[in-house]
Image (cartoon, grey):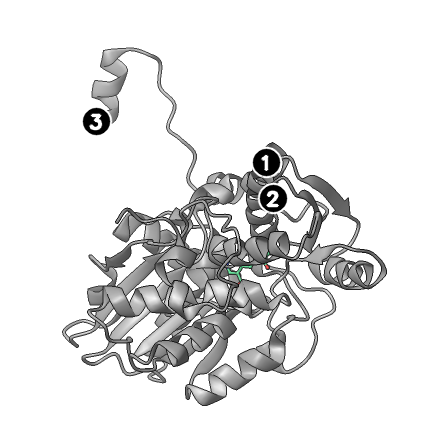
Amino acid sequence: MPWSGVIHQYRDYLPLPADARIITLNEGNTPLVRSSQLAELLAPMTGLELFFKFEGLNPTGSFKDRGMTAAISHAIYEGSETIICASTGNTAASAAAYAARSGLRCLVLVPEGKIALGKLAASLAYGAEVISIAGSFDDGLNMVREIVNRRQITLVNSINPWRLEGQKTGAFEVCDQLDGQAPDWHCLPVGNAGNITAYWMGYRQYGKGLPRLLGAQAAGAAPIVSGKIVENPETVATAIRIGNPARWQQAVQALDESDGLITSVSDEEILDAWRNLASMEGLFVEPASASGLAALKKLIKMEEIDPSNKRIVVVLTGHGLKDPGTAVEKATKPYQLPAEIEALEAYLA
Ligand code: AN7
């Protein structure tokens, strides 16, 4: 049977009503790519098996589509006509796409000047009403939480339990792709902590073993690591520029139950890992998506994680084309030549 999205694929594991109309873009089924060079660089001769779950290959370019297919399908089932979210960008683009397919009105609140270009472009293209607020993601989340108490609007941030239901299919896929066995470690970025919460739900439900979780927060936006709300979060990884995660408690519980770890990584460490992924593995991701690898590198180096004969999965949450601005800014400039063959010869010499 051709792949037709995560709900059809894992229907028995999802509590959606049998007669719900499924709004899908055939999300999921993303590749689990074996590391080509980085495993040897990180932990030479240790037998480390390193894999990247490339979630940037979902239909709107991020992992959010797994949860959004479930949230939107359920919103339609309930008879909702309008959805809303606050977003650092990827949730907005995903919500906008699934709303477009189902004819829902879609409002997205984004932090002014702090949303990557690809996310803004997509949200506008899909026809969402994009509202740029003079505040942070956290301010936007407070606003949308309040407005759904006042009006008949469905909230599609990961506070919505259907987001987690759809998102947990990522864990099922990882197990299926590793011949029915969960990895030893599962590494991923943590912003609102919906993804880490959902992966843990998924691993537990699937019954194919449990990994230890490794969460990564940006040093300038690391409330769970520090145990304190961050009033003014700041990081190059704008996707995870979040100071008060919606799923904070659940993330702490998942980390605890999995005997996991959460650590913060500097912007420099994030960008190093981001360059490693593109230049050594051919995997172009947005900066936030590299933070899971940055955390793994750091903890292997500090000998807090022993890579010997371990299977480790690192989730790459969003595609590099989401944030072309940062990519160009952090790269060396293109070399400029006249359009003449001799100039090219001179360059090669
Ligand atoms: C690429 O889109 O919060 O810990 O509003 O876009 O589940 O929040 C995005 C989060 C990691 C963190 N990687 O996941 C939003 C938003 C990327 C992301 C995260 C996000 P959560």
At label 1, the amino acid type is: Tyr
Q: Quadrant of residue 121?
A: top right
Residue at left 51%, top 59%? 67
Residue 154 seen from this side = yes
Q: Mark 1 or mark 3, which is nearer the start of the sequence?
A: 1
Q: Secondary structure at mark 1?
A: loop
Q: Quadrant of residue 141?
A: bottom right
Q: Mark 2 or mark 3, which is nearer the start of the sequence?
A: 2
User: Are the residues flagged by discs 2 and 1 in contact, CB closer than 8 Å?
Assistant: yes
Q: Nearer the viewer, mark 3 or mark 1?
A: 1
19, above or below 15, in the image: above
Q: Position of residue 107 (x, y in %)?
A: 71, 46
Find disc 2 in the rendering and name its residue.
99
Front-most of 133 and 173?
173
Q: Position of residue 337 (x, y in %)?
A: 35, 19
Front-most of 8 and 276?
8
- Determine whether, in the image, residue 49 is placed left or right of residue 203: left
At label 3, the amino acid type is: Leu
Residue at left 52%, top 44%? 326
Indicate which quadrant contains ligand 1: bottom right
Q: Which label belongs to residue 348?
A: 3
Q: Nearer the viewer, mark 3 or mark 2?
A: 2
Find disc 1 in the rendering and name its residue.
126
Residue at left 46%, top 61%? 270
Q: Position of residue 284 (x, y in %)?
A: 37, 47
Residue extending furthest toward the front = 19
Front-most of 23 and 36?
23
Residue at left 51%, top 57%? 19
284, above or below 228, in the image: above
Q: Badge 2: few (under 14), some or many (20 or more) residues near its Cα, within 10 Å?
A: many
